[in-house]
Amino acid sequence: QVQLVESGGGLVQAGGSLRLSCAASGRTFSTYAMGWFRQSPGQEREFVAAISGNGVSTAYADSVKGRFTISRDNAKNTVYQQMNSLQPEDTAGYYCVVRLSSWLTIKDGSYDYWGQGTQVTVSS
């Protein structure tokens, strides 16, 4: 049984930082691409960031480029997302995803497993 457990969400003031973590279990994820999507009420789900299985390649949405950093620790089956300079428009539920391929993609339909999400709220 594959499980993705996100943590690190919370309430932060604009300009602040948070670090999200996603611990994966049930398989060895070291060769699989992982990433983050987000969704806020009434909005479509949005790609945020992704990292390839070997951690060499990354991709970011334009809206977070330069502020968010995705990384992974394959020994711990964990992916992280450091979020700096947070703004109210970053408020959303953030979802960890895994794709059963080493190649990353920004398409949500290409990811095979999804976590339950962690809420990030940025106050102005």
Image (cartoon, helix red, strand yellow):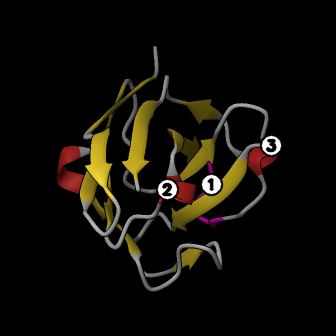
Helix, strand, or loop for circle 2? Answer: helix
Q: How far apart are marks 2 and 1 (CA)?
A: 33 Å
Image vertical order of residue 37 relative to residue 23, above or below:
below
Task: Name the amino acid type tagged 1.
Answer: Ser
Crowd around label 1: few <14 · some 14–19 · many ≥20 (10 Å): some
Crowd around label 3: few <14 · some 14–19 · many ≥20 (10 Å): few
| Residue indicated by mark 3 | 44
Q: Where is residue 46 in the image (x, y as percent from the top left)?
A: 71, 52
The answer to whether any part of residue 101 appears in the image is: yes
The answer to whether any part of residue 33 appears in the image is: no
Checking the image for residue 88, the label placed there is: 2
Of circles 3 and 1, the one toward us is 3
User: Which residue range is magenta in the image?
Assistant: 99-104
Quarter of the image that includes the C terminus: bottom left
| Residue indicated by mark 1 | 101
Residue at horizontal 74%, vertical 43%? 45
Task: Name the amino acid type tagged 3.
Answer: Glu
